[in-house]
Amino acid sequence: MVNSLSLRSILDVNKLTSPNFIDRFRNIKILLKQEKKAYVLNGPVLEKPSDDATNEENEAYTVYVDDLDQATCVMLASIALDLKKQHEAIKALDIILNLREMFDKESHTERFDISRELFRCKMSEGSPRKPYVVKMI
């Protein structure tokens, strides 16, 4: 039975831009996990088998390369056009490293600013709790 559930529509919602890198990368991993291809991002990188490799080793490498190409295409399809042009000639693992280098600093800064604002937030005595709780959430 063919699995009719496709999560590819989650990539159509928004293209990757700097503020949403973490969310977009999470969506890509979810999609690849559903398609049984997430191992190419998490597992060891397979090296091309030697000339005296067995048929099984050659087949495993071919499947790995195909899955890596599909993961690369999914990633390219989910990023904005300017980023797509920068990354179209490289593989998924290198795309991830490059995008993390570009956008992780911004994500850390944004999280730090939100945390700092949260920790500075104090409820004044006698004020209603509801607005304070809503702001904390």
Image (spheres, rainbow, N blue to C red):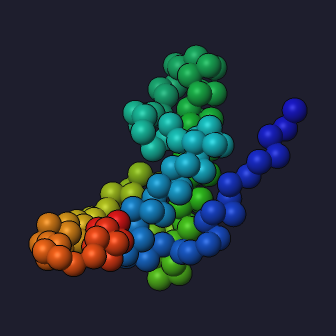
| Direction from residue 60 to residue 136 in the image, left or right | left
| Direction from residue 122 to residue 103 in the image, left or right | right
| Direction from residue 114 to residue 37 in the image, left or right | right
Q: Please state the horizontal and vertical placement of residue 116, each as a whole percent of the image.
A: 14, 70
Toward the right, the furthest residue is: 1
The one of 62 and 113 positioned closer to us in this rendering: 113
Residue drawn at 53 percent across, 81 percent down: 81
The one of 36 and 87 positioned closer to us in this rendering: 36
Q: Quadrant of residue 124?
A: bottom left
Toward the bottom, the furthest residue is: 82
Residue 72, above or below 36:
below
How many numbered discs, if any?
0
In this view of the protein, can residue 70 be seen by the observer? yes
Residue 55, above or below 69:
above
Q: Please state the horizontal and vertical placement of residue 25, each as a whole percent of the image.
A: 45, 58
Q: Please state the horizontal and vertical placement of residue 121, each as a whole percent of the image.
A: 16, 73
Residue drawn at 73 percent across, 52 percent down: 6
In this view of the protein, can residue 91 be seen by the observer? no
Quadrant assignment for the C terminus: bottom left
Q: Please state the horizontal and vertical placement of residue 17, each as a whole percent of the image.
A: 43, 77
Residue drawn at 48 percent across, 72 percent down: 16
